[in-house]
Amino acid sequence: MEGFNIQRVEKITGCSVVNLTGIENKIGTAYSIFSRLAEKNINVIIILQSVNAISTCANIGFVINESD
């Protein structure tokens, strides 16, 4: 990839990736998802969110420990 300077790549073992696609892109949606995880004491390591500029849908991905 031209123009990028990748400093480091890591593999995280013992983790699971959860991807939620096509969710409603409105205020409070992410809060609703992550507050429920917090109630269950599930720690989120990484959060990624993307929004399609054309539609009203969003995608949220996150990484949690497999033990959670």
Image (cartoon, helix red, strand yellow):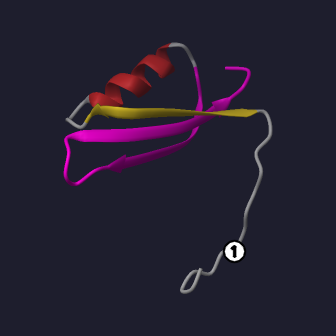
Question: In screen coordinates, is 21 left or right of 9?
Answer: left
**Measuring 20% from the left and 45% from the top, which residue is drawn there?**
55
Q: Quadrant of the N terminus?
A: bottom right
Q: How many marks?
A: 1
For the residue marked with disc 1, what is the amino acid?
Gln
Q: Left or right? Give the position of 41 relative to 26.
A: right
Up/down of 10 relative to 49, above or below: below
Give the answer, above or below, for where 55 lies relative to 26.
Answer: below
Q: Is residue 15 left or right of residue 36?
A: right
Q: Is residue 7 rendered to the left or right of residue 28?
A: right
Count neighbours of disc 1 (C-alpha within 10 A) and say few if under 14, some if 14 to 19, many if 20 or more: few
Outermost residue, bottom side: 3
* Secondary structure mainly formed by the magenta segment: strand
Residue 18: x percent and y percent? 55, 32
In this view, 48 is above or below 20: below
* Position of residue 3 measured from the top left corner of the image (x, y, whole percent): 54, 86
Q: Residue at x 73, y 21 (%)?
A: 67
Q: Secondary structure at mark 1?
A: loop
Q: Which residue is mark 1?
A: 7
The picture quadrant where one finds residue 59 is top left
**Any magenta on residue 43?**
yes
* Picture quadrant of residue 53: bottom left
Q: Quadrant of the C terminus?
A: top right
Rendered position, 15 above or below 38:
below
| Residue 6 percent coordinates (x, y) | 66, 75
Residue in view at x 72 percent, y 34 percent: 15
Q: Is residue 61 magenta?
A: yes
Q: Residue at the location (40% across, 34% down)? A: 21
Region in magenta: 42-68
